[in-house]
Amino acid sequence: MHSPFLAPDQAIAPLAIDYQHGDSEPAHSHSCSQLIHTLCGVVEVHTALGTWMVPPGRGIWLPAYVEHSLRFIGGVKARTLFVDPLARADLPAQCQVVQISPLLRELILVSLTIPAGYLPGGRDERIMELLLDELRLLPTLPLYLPEPKEPELLMLSQQICRDLSASWELEEVAARLNISSRTLSRRFQRETGLRFSDWVRQAKLLDALQQLAAGNSVIDVALALGYDSPSAFSAMFRRSLGVSPSEYFSQSEFRSPH
């Protein structure tokens, strides 16, 4: 079945949509793959496997037929590519938050100016072909929070996300569940692929991205997530993403007129 977003014989359909803070899209899927690139603002993407957080200037790849819901934090300028999943044999096969190179960013913006019925053999077709080549090389970013399926662990993970300011030490949580810390650690890693402490830190990181995008200060975010000081929070943020919170968001300041 051909996607309604793609015209016959069309491999890519670009789309520009701006969202207000708090906007959302209910669970849905497409018969084509999708790249959502955020020029500014943060997008939270939820699927049956877990949650992905897309910071400003980055993107998320969604394969065809993956059901997903979207929530927008801050004013979001989204630039989307709907892609024929058969356009290249080695397009990504899994959901993933991705780095958007300067070249890919400019190609996406230029693609928005190309009419759907462009003629083959010219500049427009070469731009679209280069876009497809770049989509095969998307570097992934560690901005995914896997969701456990086991009911007891799923309930625990939801409790953690509702109260990220708590300490959530492995031994204390295991005692509350009346199991050993070793058993909890083994079960949690089997379900999520992450150590318990790493999962909690990842949950805090993704929540921090939402709060910062909504305009909260670094000190307020640090305290809301249970850190003793803004410097401790910034150190965690830098270890995870390579830069401080202020640097991370300034790197993606929206400058394009598109």
Image: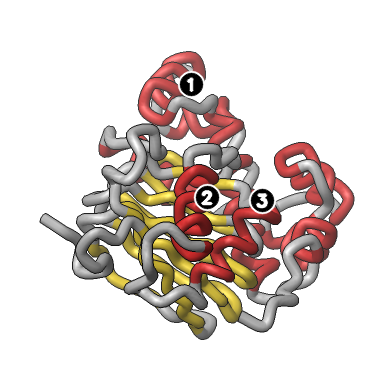
Q: How far is disc 2 from disc 1 in space, using C-alphas?
A: 45 Å
Q: Quadrant of residue 118?
A: bottom left
Name the quarter where the C terminus is drawn: bottom right
Q: x%, y% of residue 148? A: 35, 36
Q: Residue at x 54, y 25 (%)?
A: 195
Residue shown at the point (54%, 56%) measured from the top left = 59
Q: How is the image coloured?
A: secondary structure
Label 2 residue SS? helix
Q: Answer yes or no: do the residues labelled 2 and 1 have beta carbons within 8 Å?
A: no
Residue 76 image position (x, y, % from top left) = 56, 76
Identify residue for label 3.
101
Type of amino acid under label 3: Ser
The first of marks 2 and 1 along the sequence is 2
| Percent x, y of residue 67 | 25, 55
Q: Residues within 10 Å of mark 3 (few under 14, many from 20)?
A: some
What residue does disc 1 label? 185
- Give the left or right position of residue 221, taking residue 63 as reference: right
* 124 shown above or below 226: below
Type of amino acid at the residue the image marks with label 1? Ser
- Residue 132: x and y in percent read 45, 48
Image point 74% across, 76% down: which residue? 255
| Amino acid type, label 2 | Leu
Task: Quarter of the image for the N terminus: give it.
Answer: bottom left
